[in-house]
Image (cartoon, rainbow, N blue to C red):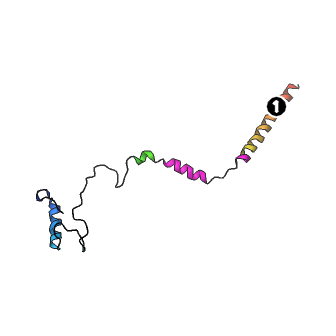
Amino acid sequence: LSVTPLSKSRGLKFAEQQLLRHGWEQGKGLGRAENGISEAIKVKVKCDKGGVGHKEGEQFTFHWWDHVFNKASSNLQVESDQIFGEMNKRNTLYYKKEIHMLFQLGDF
């Protein structure tokens, strides 16, 4: 807690008095073995409205919908040959019906 006497705040003076009352000496560390911190922790004023640990740019880099889609699609099991085979059969049957109908209309 080595701070110049002119710049000590009221709270810092109180803390130093409490430490001195319990046997602490200036320049020594805190704790039974005196190996703890020897200077007061510097406090920063937080002016923004983000929470503690909030990273402002993270909201623009984390795409949650991509993760949700990947998780949902990983549960699907599709055999592509089966689907395209069925589609081709349907298309050829429909195509044959159209051609057959045209030929029937032309027979009149």
The residue identified by callout 1 is 99
Q: Residue furthest right?
A: 107
Q: Residue at x 23, y 71 (%)?
A: 34
For numbered disc 1, what is the local secondary structure?
Answer: helix
Q: Main secondary structure of the magenta part?
A: helix
Q: Quadrant of residue 27?
A: bottom left
Q: Residue at x 37, y 47 (%)?
A: 56
Q: Magenta segment range?
A: 62-82
Residue 60 on the magenta span: no
Amino acid marked by disc 1:
Ile
- Is residue 63 depicted above or below 26 in this figure? above
- Is residue 55 depicted above or below 13 in this figure? above
- Is residue 9 depicted above or below 86 in this figure? below
Give the image location of residue 84, x and y in percent.
Answer: 72, 43
Who is closer to the viewer here, 44 or 34? Answer: 34
Number of labelled discs? 1
Residue 70 on the magenta span: yes
Q: Around disc 1, counting alpha carbons within 10 Å, would you say few (fewer than 14), some (14 to 19), or many (20 or more)? A: few
| Left or right, residue 4 beside residue 78 | left
Give the image location of residue 103, x and y in percent.
Answer: 85, 28
Who is closer to the viewer here, 51 or 41? Answer: 41
Give the image location of residue 62, x and y in percent.
Answer: 46, 48
Q: Residue at x 66, y 52 (%)?
A: 77
